[in-house]
Amino acid sequence: MNRRKTKAVVVQLGSPKSPKISDVRAYLKEFLGDPRVVDVTPWLWKIILNLFILPFRPKRSAKLYSRIWDGKSFPLITITEAFAAKVSKALPDSDTVELNHAFLLSNPRVSDVWDSWEKDLEDKPDEAATRLLAIAMFPQYSGSTVASGMDGFAKVLSKRTRIPPFEFLTDFHRSHAFIDNSARLVDHHLKSLNSDKKVDKLIMSFHGIPKRWVIYNGDAYYQHCYETFCLIKERLKEINPVDVEYAFQSRFGSEEWLTPYTDDRVDELIEQGHKNIAVYCPAFVADCLETVDEIGVELKEQAHESGGDVHHIPCLNDDDQWCQDFAKLIDAHANGDSKTIQSQYINFDSSRYEPMAEQKMKSPPLSPHAKSSIKIVFLTLFLDLIGFSIIFPLFPQLAKHYLETDADNVFLKAIFGSIASLTQVGGADVSSIVLFGGALGALYSLLQFIAAPIWGGISDRIGRKPVLLISVACLALSYGLWFFAGSFTVLILARLVGGIMGGNISTATAVVADVTESKNRSKGMAFVGIAFALGFIFGPALGGISAQWNLLDTWPSLAAYGVNPFSVPAAIAFILSFINFWSLLFRFKETLPIDKRGESHLQRSFNPFKLFSPLPYPGVNLTNFSHFLFLSAFSGMEFTLTFLAFERLGYSPMDNAYMFIFIGFVLAMVQGGVVRRKASQVGERKMALMGLISVIPGLILIGFAQSTFLIYFGLFFLAVGSAMAIPCLTALVSLYSPANEQGRSVGIFRSLGALARVIGPIAASLIYWKYGSAVPYYVGSAFLLIPILLVMKLPDFKHEQ
């Protein structure tokens, strides 16, 4: 039997079920969860998506979708349905071609089309299609659209047994159907607009994609957009070709996207006197949020504010002639030979047109080697910070435990003897325990601060990998010592080893410098900052939660081997370090070549305090000092908080963990929902100032707090303030520094931060011991006036447009 019938499927992206926030969130979760749409490391993107984007973006997007909702559906859905119906009716031979439509993110799905084909095979096998033709309704090919559609088909295919021969039409941007009808439609609207007031400029606005995809991944999208622009432009009759331009819209995130940007170009044209602008969107064949609202509403409002006007030219939608011509294109692919198919397309001779503009990136992406190295560095620093902070919620109970079980320990007696002579109070009251804890906590930071330049210098001579392996192995050893720290002496030894080996931060940072260029170094250094933030969030939380399990409750005999009530947190930290060691051993490749070793150690001082010599950039010095003062006050709060909660409310380690989890959650929400999107708009200096000011009521509230509600209320202000202040101050250091001083400036910034974490806990503990639990917070709030005044003196940084 030679019967041949094609089941053609036109595939569109889809829309949310409704403009309800829950429906928009579900839609965005599926859309942004596609690795073709956002090609960030999957586990990292899941964290960003679920913590920073989905809690905030759906609410804003829902408002936008509500503006194009007709009460039953969205334009993309209704237009696609009407288009499919008209094309089906226009097909020359319905016996040989059957047309369906489907969506990637709406109903009917691709799987529904497949179900209908399988049902036809069962119910009417003689009439069922023998092959499949899938057409992604995106004229130009892109990995984020067409390839995503192909992935959708592949996912369905992977679950099916019967698979017919099929063809996937990946682009139709040079088809007569698309080009000729686009030119006809644009001319029609230009003629209508010109009858009222002459159009000065026409912009063909394509959907944007990251430049990286085009320059480094070989995505054909930009080439296809250029060909589309040239072919439509030369067919237009109602406007001078010199007045036709192209641009790119719908940017997402902070990455560099294809330029010029549509919104920026409109402002520039209006400023040049071209106030009446028409915009056509040839990356879409059906109107949707990006055309109706982004161009027809938002861009129009923007133009009005600048003294101009924007006219949105509708997409092809279900235009009769377009539907008839597209039906011919489908029929050619379904039934025609290669010559027939070729006749449906326009030959593009690039020599007839101006060369396409080269897309360049100010900050190139990280290389695969850099990404691999930085991932290991991220893990190393993350675990270092967990090791530093995992003990935070345990300090009150830790001190009490050793005073009860190892009271005759020479180190413990010396410490509390000194405290008793200072306080003239015998025994170990809460204030004394706070002072003890402050000294023990600051010891770790002090050792890190001293060891950092030493480890960095050694790594310059023998390479990064040996230093990282030695330091991580010894970190694991320190956690092992803590696991068996039945005596206070062993605990002190564990913290000594951990602090010294935790100073490998300079080596880890040097790895980032090794594998990045000056243009993209900030991208690598951003991971260092993220590792710090996550370490300070997860460390205390992990310590408080894991301390709920006391091995001695189940196996009391283990006490003879030094196992203690806090051995479980130590065991977890040991396991994480062990994993880190093996990851470094087998996955990390040396980043400092032999021929470059020994070059930089001559410029690197083993004296950490020499790092703080002023730089000839006033903005950098003021920002560094402001950050140092702020972090001194903040780390003092961070350290004494568990003692205050224990003294006033009897908090357990688990209760303390909840506090740090709450702080981490608010930090993530504010950094992801506010700082990431608004910092450059508001200005980093202004946002840093807002953050510093927000911390003050938080400190005062905690100082007054006699209830859990007030403590958490104060913590909210603290978390919001620090979420705005720390990343914005970090950004300001980089922005104020010239390209060749980025590493030094950021290095001083981080070293001052480490020193602040030494001074802050000690100073806060001394004040706590001398004047009571509330005073450190009142003093801290007053102390913050200094960095606030310093930040007010900083110049605003103007971002390049």
Image: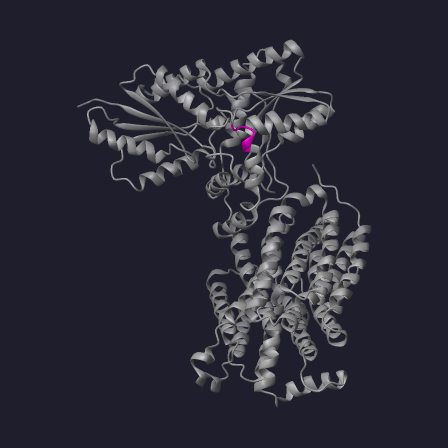
Relative to 563, 433 lies left or right: right
User: In the rendered image, which quarter contains the N terminus?
Assistant: top left
* Between 512 and 386, the one nearer to me in the picture: 386
Q: Main secondary structure of the magenta part?
A: loop
Q: Residue furthest top?
A: 195
Q: Quick check: can you spot residue 381?
A: no
Image position of 266 with respect to 436: above or below: above
Q: Quick check: can you spot residue 46?
A: yes
* Between 265 and 764, the one nearer to me in the picture: 764
Report x, y in % for residue 108: 38, 32
Report x, y in % for residue 709: 63, 61
Image position of 735 with respect to 290: above or below: below
Q: Quadrant of residue 109?
A: top left
Magenta residues (range): 65-69
Report x, y in % for residue 782: 79, 62
Q: Residue furthest bottom?
A: 408
Relative to 522, 335 lies left or right: left
Q: Residue furthest left?
A: 1
* Between 380 and 117, the one nearer to me in the picture: 117
Q: Residue at x 66, y 43 (%)?
A: 678
User: In the rendered image, which quarter contains the C terminus?
Assistant: top right
Image position of 152 with respect to 75: above or below: below
Image position of 636 with respect to 213: above or below: below
* Between 372 and 734, the one nearer to me in the picture: 734
Q: Quadrant of residue 197?
A: top right
Q: Residue at x 57, y 81 (%)?
A: 401
Q: Residue at x 48, y 52 (%)?
A: 43
Say whether residue 170 is magenta: no
